[in-house]
Image (cartoon, rainbow, N blue to C red):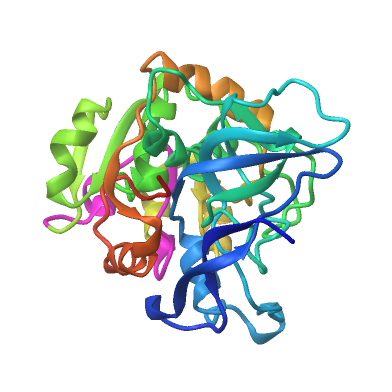
Amino acid sequence: MAEMMKVVQLHEFGGPEVLKYEDAPRPIASGGDVLVRVHAASINPPDLYLRDGYRALPPEWQPDPAFPIIPGTDVSGIVAAIGDDVSGFSVGDEVYAMVRFPEDLMKGSGAYAEYVCVPASELAQKPESIDHAQTAGAPMSLLTAWQFLVAPGHGAVNPFQSFPHMPVPLGGKTVLVNGAGGGVGHLAVQVAKWKGARVIAVASGKHEALLRDLGADDFIDYTRVAAEAVVQNVDLVLDAVGGPDMERFLKSIKPGGALFLANPLGFSGHDEAARRGVTVSSTQVRSNGTQLAEAGRLLGNGTFRVVIDSTFLLAEASAAHERAARGGIQGKVVLITG
C-alpha cells in the first residue's frame, strides 16, 4: 500500500477556495529524480494562473486538465530518497529547486505537498545561512531575474519571440526595474546592482525603504508620478509587471537600449521600438540547478536577499492565494509544510 502525504490540490479550476488540503500518495524517486521532503514552498504568478485555468490565455493555449492537480514549483527541503543514476546529492542534504518548469506549466509541478520528486538537474544545495522559507522564495523569481539579466542558461526556443533572448552588459549602465517591490522585481534590483548598474526602482511608496536598503540608487513612487514622465535615457527597463500600456516605457529608453518584458502578452509597441532603436525582448524562465547553485552562493553570502511578505501553513494555501491575489506584495508569499 502506498505511503500517503498531505498535499494541496485542485479538483476544478476557480478561486482560492478550490484549493483542497487532503491526502495523496507519496511519490517515489525513479531514475534521475530525487525525492525531497518539502519544508517550504513559495507562491508564484503561474500558480494563480493555473488555479484559475489560465482563463486569460487564448482558448487554444488553455490546459486540458487531468485532475487532481498539485500546483507549485518552488521548494526548499531535505533529500529523502534518491533514484537510480543520480550523483551529487545524498539523503539528508538540504536542497532547493524550481520543479519541472515550464514543462509542467499546465498540469502542476507538485510543490504544494509534503514530498515532491525533482529531476536532479534542477536541484541545488540550499544555502546554509538562510532558512527554508527564504530559500523557497528564491527559485522562480531569482531564476527569472538571472535569465533576463545574467545568462539564459538554455537554448530552448523562445515561445514569445522569433529570436533568443540575450542579456546586455550592465556595468556602468542605468537600469529601471518596474514592479521592484514584488518577487521578481526585488531580486532584479539586487542582480542589476551586483552586475554594476545604477538602479532606479519603481514601486508604491511603502517599498521605498526596503528597496533602497537592497541597493536601489533612486526610487519612484508610481502612485505619485509616472516613471516614464520623469525618467529619460536609461539603458534598460525591466518590466516585471506586464499588463496594459507597457509601451509607455519606450520613451524613457535611449537609442540602442532595451526593454525586457517579464510578461510580454499584450505588448503592441514593436513598431515604435524599431523607430526608437530599442530592442524589446522576453524569455520564459526555465528550471536550472546549475544556475541555482551559482545564485545560491550569492544568497548564502548575503549579496542577494529574499524578502518574505508573509508565511502560511500548507493547510492555509487558500488564504495564501488570497493574499497573493490582493497584490501589493513585498517579496514572496511562502507556504510552510512543517
Q: Nearer the viewer, residue 24 or 134?
A: 24
Q: Nearer the viewer, residue 324 or 268?
A: 324
Q: In the rendered image, which quarter contains the C terminus?
A: top left
Which stretch is magenta? 224-247
User: Is residue 98 shown to the viewer in this render?
Assistant: yes
Q: Position of residue 186 (x, y in %)?
A: 34, 39
Q: Position of residue 31 (x, y in %)?
A: 86, 41
Q: Is residue 6 left or right of residue 320?
A: right
- The residue lying at 83 percent from left, 44 percent from top is 30
Q: Is residue 307 left or right of residue 119?
A: left
Number of numbered discs: 0
Q: In the rendered image, which quarter contains the N terminus?
A: bottom right
- The residue lying at 35 percent from left, 28 percent from top is 305
Residue 26 sits above or below residue 307 on the image = below
Q: Is residue 191 highlighted in magenta?
A: no
User: Is residue 257 shown to the viewer in this render?
Assistant: no
Q: Is residue 246 highlighted in magenta?
A: yes
Q: Position of residue 134 (x, y in %)?
A: 38, 35
Q: Is residue 213 left or right of residue 29?
A: left
Locate residue 288: give its quadrant.
top right
- The residue lying at 66 percent from left, 42 percent from top is 287
Q: Position of residue 196 (x, y in %)?
A: 42, 18
Q: Nearer the viewer, residue 241 or 24?
A: 24
